[in-house]
Amino acid sequence: MNVIGIKFFGFVLDIITGSKNLVLGLQFAMNGEPKNATQRVETSLSGKILAIVLPRRSLRYILTLHSLLKYPPGDYPDNVRENIVKGFVRICSFIRDESKIARKLVECINTYLLNDGPNLGLLLLEIHNALQQFVFHCWLTTHDRVLKDSLVFYARIQLSLMRGAADRCLLVEQLLDVICKDLDQGSMSSTSMLRGDGNKDDKLGALSSSQCGLVELAAVLFYRACLNTTRSSLSEKRVKREPAAMILREALMQGNYDLMKDLWCRNAAFCCLTRNFHTRICKDLFLYWFEGICMSFERIMNSSNVDRIYDGLLWTLRSLLELSSVLLLPNSRMELSAVSSSGFKEFVKGWQLLWSTIVHGLPIISNINALVDAALLLLSNITSNDFVNTSVIPQDVWDLQIFKRPNSM
C-alpha cells in the first residue's frame, strides 16, 4: 500500500475509533451537556486540548468521515476493516432517536457497505445487530424523508450482501414485518378526485422516487419470502406465522376497500414483484393470487366509483395486466391446462368475468385517462387469447368518446 493509502485509512480509523470527540458529542446529543469540566475536555490523538465537544462538532466528524468513505484509495486492509466495523458498532450504541447526526451516520454506513460490503462476511451481521433497533424504531415514525430513503437503501444493501441462509431469512422476516406496516399505514396517500378533475388525473398512479424505492424493496422481500413457497404448502397447519403469499393475496383482494389504509400500495409492490421475478416463482402462486383478485374485482371497482378514490382500482388493473403477461403466455397456459381440466376452466371463467366487469364499468371511468389506458390494455390481452365473445359488447361502450374518430382539422 502506498503512503496516500496508509494516511487515508489511518485518518478514517482516527475518526471512527481513535478520537473520543465523536463519541462524546454523540453522548451529549443523546443525554445533554455533561455536568463536570473533566467530561467536557478531551485530548485528541495529536495531544492538543480541544474545547467543549458539542453535537455540532460530532456532525463535522461524521461529514468528514462520509466524504472519506466515498472515495477510498483502494481495498481496505483486514485489520482496518475490523476496526472500522467495531467503530461503527460503538457509535451506533449512542444513536437512539432521529437527528442530523443519525441520518449522516446511516449514510456513512451505506457508503461503506457499497464499497466494502462484499468483503465483510460475518461483520455485516455485527453492523446490523448494532443498527437494527434504530432502523426499526425510526422506520415507521420518522417524517424525515431523507432518513427514510437512507433506511430503505440500507435494507436493500444488507439484503443483497448477506449470504448466510439463516441470517438472510431472519432479516427478510424483520423487514417484511415492518414494510407491511409501513405500506398499510399510508406512506403513499390515495388520490381522491371528482369527475373531470384533470390535474389529479395526471397524478393518479404516479410514484415519487421515495415511493418507488419502498415498492421495489417490498417486491424483493415478497420474492425472498415466496421463493420456496408452493400453493400446496400454504395449507400446512404447522406454519407458525402467516405466509407472505397469503398476506399478499389478502391485500390484493382488498384493493383500497379499507379507507383507513392505503392497501393499494401492496398492489404496486405486486406489480413490481410480477414484472421482475415472475420467472423465479411458481406459476401456481400467480394463479393463487389471480383467483383472489377475481373474487373481489367487482367489489373493488364498485367501491372505487362510490368513494371516488381510484388508486386501488388502477393498481388492481395494473396487477392484472402484469398477471396477463405471465399467465396468458402459451407455455403458462399449457402448464395450467395440464394440471387440471376443471382448474383450467375456472381460470378461463376468471378472465371472462374480468372482461365483463371492465366492459360494463368502462362508461363510468371513461373520463379518467389512467384507468381507461390500463383497462383497454387488459381487455386487449384477454380478447387476443380468444377467451371472450367480443360481439356482446354493450352499445354504450361503443358510444364512448374514446372510440370515436376525432374530427379532421
Image (cartoon, grey):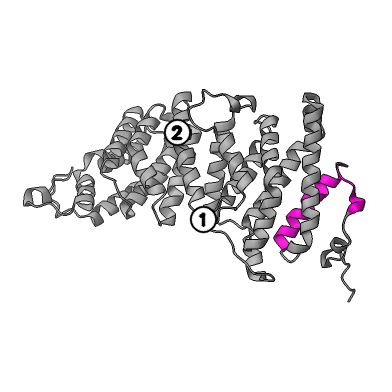
- Indicate whether residue 174 is drawn in magenta: no
User: Picture coordinates of residue 300 (x, y %)?
Assistant: 66, 52
User: Picture coordinates of residue 61 (x, y %)?
Assistant: 28, 50
CA–CA distance between discs 1 and 2? Answer: 28 Å
Tell me where residue 314 sits by quadrant: bottom right
Per the image, the residue denoted by label 2 is 171
Range of magenta residues: 369-392
User: Picture coordinates of residue 210 (x, y %)?
Assistant: 51, 53
Q: Main secondary structure of the magenta part?
A: helix
Residue nearest the observer in this picture, 272 or 100: 272
Q: Quadrant of the N terminus?
A: top left
The residue tagged with tag 1: helix, strand or loop? loop
- Indicate whether residue 370 is drawn in magenta: yes
Q: Quadrant of the C terminus?
A: bottom right
Residue placed at 63% from the left, 54% from the top? 312
Mark 1 vs mark 2: in front: 1
135 relative to 122, above or below: below
Residue placed at 34% from the left, 40% from the top? 133
The residue tagged with tag 2: helix, strand or loop? helix
Residue placed at 20% from the left, 55% from the top? 54
